[in-house]
Image: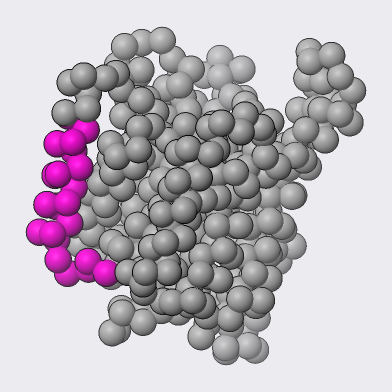
Amino acid sequence: MDFIRDQPRRAEGSYRETSTAASTTRPGDRLAWIDVAKGIGIALVVIGHACAEATAINAMWARDVIYLFHMPLFFIVSGYLAKPGPLASYARQRLNALMVPYVCYLFIIGVPVALATHQLHGRSASHEFALYGFGGQHLVTYMTVFWFVTCLFFAQIIYRAMQRISASPYDWRIVGIIAACCFFSYTVLPRLHVLTALDVGVVPMALVLIWFGQIYRSLDGRPRLVFGACLIALIGLGMYLHYFPLYAFDMKSTLFGPFLPGLSTAVALSWLMFELSKRLASSKIWVACISPFGRASLTIMFLSEPVRRLLLMVGAPAVLSVAGAMIVPVVLHTLFEHNQLSSRLLLGQTVRRKSDPKTAAFGTPTR
């Protein structure tokens, strides 16, 4: 399922809404590089969480680098695919695609975890699960990545509403909203010291990143300009690190790093990953190896930590637990796709009916 957004058509830069499960991944196709980018991105998410618990120097370095941009990448992908259109129908589609699986996995994983751990925290199981329902930073260990889904849900809908003001990311009104979001994220939010339900406090920063995805799309076909901008951002990061220590761009914890190097580095590394993905997408082998993980990225988001932690509990080596956290969710995603109930509830999709030619595979309508 494409949990990010609608996939683009190749012809004339137009867009159509479709599930990535239904998308073609032909070498050189824009759809292919997006799946490759998401596949690499979700691998970085899994590896980053594994490295966050490690004590080896190499693992700590890997974690520090990954945490500069691994979650911003997904919001920027969403921005690249953002397009104007009806708001109400889009909100319903996003509700089914994101929040239905979110609630289902919250119960499937959260109830057993609450029953198993509530006494460790000195509260009832119902109280423990109520905190999971609050979401955001209360979702840890087995559900630590869940915050992303609710944040993406609200950010996508708000940005769709912004596009009703103007479809151009360069419109002064859109730029003004993004500037206000930056101001809130870097000056107001750090002083609030409150946990927001479903991590809605992170939504303004998510909107900024989605906007940068729109900027990247406006630079399609101009790789020299993209590489130049990225080089300037990374030079700025090097100058910053000459005087100050490395930071983490940890959106869940509302840690966005220093304003200029933090935001520019997250964007630059994401853009460079997109450029790499475009080149990898020219190879059938790379597309075949990476794109299945991109198409199943939401399922991996939900299941990678439970799988990895359970493998560690039974004595699996750390490397094997990371591999299992990637492969097992992809296998389950494939199985879920072939059942109407599991596809609807766990993937946010519906199985295509052969009698409905206007419906793309797994029920995502085309336009």
In this rendered view, identify the residue nearer to me: 23 or 218: 218
Q: Is residue 328 above or below residue 33?
A: above
Whether residue 54 is in magenta: the answer is no
Is any atom of residue 351 visible in this view?
Answer: no
Q: Residue sitting at 43 percent across and 48 percent down?
A: 182
Percent coordinates x, y for residue 284 in the rendering: 25, 60
Percent coordinates x, y for residue 112 in the rendering: 79, 30
Q: Is residue 347 above or below residue 232?
A: below
* Location of residue 247 (image quadrant): top left
Where does the N terminus fall, quadrant-wise?
A: bottom right
Q: Residue sitting at 57 percent across and 89 percent down?
A: 357
Q: Is residue 213 above or below residue 323?
A: below
In this rendered view, identify the residue nearer to me: 321 or 75: 75
Whether residue 224 is in magenta: the answer is yes
Q: Residue sitting at 61 percent across and 17 percent down?
A: 313
Question: Which SS type dominates the magenta stretch?
Answer: helix
Percent coordinates x, y for residue 109 in the rendering: 73, 37
Task: Give, as a single range, the part of the protein colored magenta.
Answer: 218-238
Left or right of 218? Residue 75 is right
Q: What colouring method underlies this structural image?
A: one colour
* Location of residue 259 (image quadrant): top left
Left or right of 229? Residue 92 is right
